[in-house]
Amino acid sequence: MKQFIFLVMLLWGLNSYSQNYESNYKADICACIEAQENTQQLPDKIYNACFTKHMTTYAAIIDAQIKEEDKTKKFIAGQQVRRDLNQKFKYDLAYVCDAYIDIIEGKKQHALQQLRSRTIDSSKIEKLNENVAMVPHYSSYYNRGQYYYQIGDLNNAERDIKKSIQENPLNQDGVLSLQESLLLALIYEGQKRYSEAIAIYDAVNAKAIHPSVELLKAIAYRKSKGYVLKPKVVLKEGVEPVVAAKEKIEKPPVKATRRSSQRVPAPNTEQNNTTSKRTRTATRTGTSTVAEPANKQAPTKSKDSTKNLRGLFKLD
């Protein structure tokens, strides 16, 4: 009897664990993201790495819930479940995991700050105004509205995007283009009109769910409930920044090279005396005398060149 009760409790525990594995799986992914919060990687890359890392814990539970005898069909069904979970957790985590939304919103705010920290290019605004005047097409209004959003002029951005939606012939029966809809929703978020932004996201996902749009909706919902991006703490309290000093590269001392002094041979006094005597004698007699070298060889006679050529080329 005790063994039966233990078996029932074990099966009940396994069943409840398998039913709640999604929440446990998301908690593990969130903890993994928290450990990599200060990394410079993209949010999608961090999320996919953590999802794959913890799949090893829940793969057996996922496959056990697939009731299929054929191994090939079971494998295909298991792959589909994994893809669906990957897409679902991608926006579900934004509702419960602050570290995940911090990374996404941090990247977005950093990009906007870089755009809005630049000096406003008045010549570009004039060019966009000229395009609207010359070609009053919906794309001209959209381009100008997009630039207004980038520089933080949300009121003018809203005006131009609404004009673009009005002039766009593809927007019929209340169905707006995805590009214009998402930009208008982001403008509403910047104006803290979160309910209007969420309404746009719901309209976009009315026919089919876009995971990226659901993620934007989750972020807008969190902001409407008071979520604020936490500022990054670069240094811990009481820790001074360490500035790396440049290492001095000491060059080896250059050794001074001494000029090699060559000894000058002492003059031969005997030879000089002999030469001077000959010079005085030649001066008295009026003739010039040239000293000849001691080891003078007699000139050799050159052979006949014609004879040499005949011997070389066998000429007759």
Image: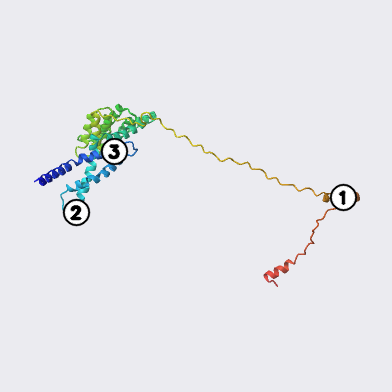
Label 1 and label 3: CA atoms lie apart by 110 Å
Instruction: Write down the residue under mark 3.
Output: 33
Label 3 and label 2: CA atoms lie apart by 34 Å
Instruction: Tell me the amino acid under the disc marked 1.
Output: Lys
- Residue closer to the observer: 21 or 312: 21
Instruction: Write down the residue under mark 1.
Output: 277
Residue 102 occupies quadrant: top left
- Residue closer to the observer: 167 or 48: 48
Instruction: Tell me the amino acid under the disc marked 2.
Output: Lys
Q: Nearer the viewer, mark 3 or mark 2?
A: 3
Q: Secondary structure at mark 2?
A: helix
Q: Tag 2 or tag 3, which sits nearer the N-term?
A: 3
Q: Tag 3 or tag 1, which sits nearer the N-term?
A: 3
Residue 197 locus on image (x, y percent): 24, 31
Residue 227 locus on image (x, y percent): 26, 29
Residue 268 locus on image (x, y percent): 80, 49
- Residue closer to the observer: 49 or 193: 49
Question: Which residue corresponds to the image point at 82% horizontal and 49% vertical from the top-left?
Answer: 269
Residue 68 locus on image (x, y percent): 16, 51
In the image, residue 196 sits, relative to residue 249, either above or below, namely above
Instruction: Tell me the amino acid under the disc marked 3.
Output: Ile
Please say if the residues under marks 1 and 2 sit with CB atoms less than 8 Å apart.
no
Crowding at label 3, few (<14), some or many (≥20) Cα neighbours within 10 Å?
many
Q: Tag 2 or tag 1, which sits nearer the N-term?
A: 2
